[in-house]
Image (cartoon, rainbow, N blue to C red):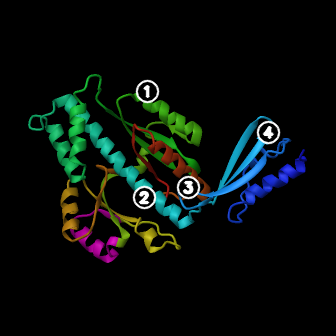
């Protein structure tokens, strides 16, 4: 019969068994408890299909056998994490754009029918979708979906939230069930923090504009300034760059070229004609009038809160006035 100290020592050995790296989990495989083992203790190693050595430990406790496997740890450096996070954000933004356009198509068809010749709202929406590079199959699928029994029209709602460090957050929703949307948002705020604000408490800190996003690695700053201003841009917002940013980091940073709604298509065409790769917005964006600085802890908490809000199906966009 093994003593408790022996068991704890063996648990410590298991924690160290992974390329010599010490990993200390919170419960150490429950070996901190007073367990008594019989003679049934064995271990073996094998080479997994992923090309990594895997060690398996078998513990016999009474009539039951427990198996624990340890894998070589997977490490992702800070730079890789930042890049992965930005790419995930870009993919999520595109998904949200497609979702929003799809819901707008459903609402337009519900109100005016599926023929864009007679439905002016739908015709304008299809032009907008073309400008934003929305795939044709998404439009066709949602036109068909609008005729399905039980499908209701979507309603636009905006909710305002107090974030951490004095930051304000605006949540844009397009939903066919308002009560469901409100409950989901309140659930995120309960889990991640934040507080619902009265209507108008946060929104006045933003202005709505059309935006063209351009990677900093795709254009020289002076060239962009010259072309964009000649094309009628109202403003050009530069991204914040970290000192330790590599070229790969910079490839995920964007200039925001701000335009009026009336001039957006012309400006986008002129930028593309000049050979500058462009990414469209999702129809419009809310830009903070006076971005505020918050400490690192508040920034991370606000980012987590916004990320969780964006995961909600009914939420199309989330904006903040904190400097990102």
**In the figure, 137 relative to 178: above or below?**
below
* Mark 2 crowdedness (10 Å alpha carbons): few <14, some 14-19, many ≥20: few
Tell me the tag on residue 299: 3
Residue at image mark 2: 87
Q: Is residue 220 magenta?
A: yes
Earlier sequence position, callout 2 versus callout 4: 4
Q: Can residue 193 be seen here?
A: no
Q: Is residue 32 magenta?
A: no
Circles 1, 4 touching at the beta carbon (< 8 Å): no
Q: Nearer the viewer, mark 2 or mark 4?
A: 4
Earlier sequence position, callout 1 versus callout 4: 4
Earlier sequence position, callout 4 versus callout 3: 4
Residue at image mark 4: 61
- Asked if residue 56 lies left or right of residue 88, the reply is right
Earlier sequence position, callout 3 versus callout 1: 1
User: Of residues 35 and 289, which is closer to you in this image?
Assistant: 35
**In the figure, 23 relative to 101: above or below?**
below
Q: Whole-Å distance between the Cαs marked 1 and 4?
A: 51 Å
Q: Which residues are magenta?
A: 218-236
Name the element at disc 4.
strand
User: Of residues 320 and 105, which is closer to you in this image?
Assistant: 105
Q: Nearer the viewer, mark 2 or mark 1?
A: 2
Rendered image quadrant of residue 53: bottom right
Tell me the tag on residue 179: 1
Circles 2, 4 touching at the beta carbon (< 8 Å): no
Name the element at disc 3.
helix
Residue depicted at 53% across the width and 73% down the height? 244
């Amino acid at each position: 019969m093994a003593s408790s100290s022996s068991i704890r020592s063996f648990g410590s050995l298991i924690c160290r068994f992974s390329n010599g790296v010490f990993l200390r989990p919170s419960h150490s495989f429950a070996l901190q408890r007073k367990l008594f083992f019989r003679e049934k203790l064995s271990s073996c190693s094998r080479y997994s299909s992923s090309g990594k050595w895997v060690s398996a430990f078998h513990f016999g406790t009474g009539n039951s056998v427990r198996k624990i496997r340890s894998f070589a740890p997977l490490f992702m450096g800070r730079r890789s994490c930042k890049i992965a996070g930005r790419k995930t954000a870009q993919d999520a933004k595109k998904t949200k754009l497609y979702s929003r356009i799809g819901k707008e198509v459903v609402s337009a068809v519900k109100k005016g029918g599926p023929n864009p010749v007679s439905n002016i709202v739908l015709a304008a929406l299809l032009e907008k979708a073309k400008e934003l590079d929305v795939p044709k199959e998404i439009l066709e699928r949602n036109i068909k979906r609008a005729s399905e029994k039980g499908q209701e029209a979507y309603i636009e709602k905006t909710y305002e939230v107090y974030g951490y460090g004095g930051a304000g957050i605006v949540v844009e929703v397009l939903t066919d069930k308002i009560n469901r949307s409100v409950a989901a948002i309140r659930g995120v705020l309960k889990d991640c923090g934040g507080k619902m604000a009265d209507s108008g408490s946060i929104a006045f800190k933003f202005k709505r504009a059309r935006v063209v996003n351009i990677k900093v690695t795709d254009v020289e700053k002076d060239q962009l300034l010259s072309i964009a201003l000649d094309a009628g841009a109202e403003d050009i917002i530069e991204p914040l760059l970290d000192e330790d940013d590599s070229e790969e980091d910079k490839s995920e940073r964007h200039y925001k070229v701000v335009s009026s709604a009336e001039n957006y298509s012309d400006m986008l065409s002129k930028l593309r004609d000049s050979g500058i790769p462009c990414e469209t917005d999702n129809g419009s964006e809310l830009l903070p009038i006076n971005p505020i600085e918050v400490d690192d802890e508040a920034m991370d908490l606000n980012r987590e809160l916004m990320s969780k809000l964006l995961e909600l199906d009914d939420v199309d966009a989330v904006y903040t006035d904190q400097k990102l």
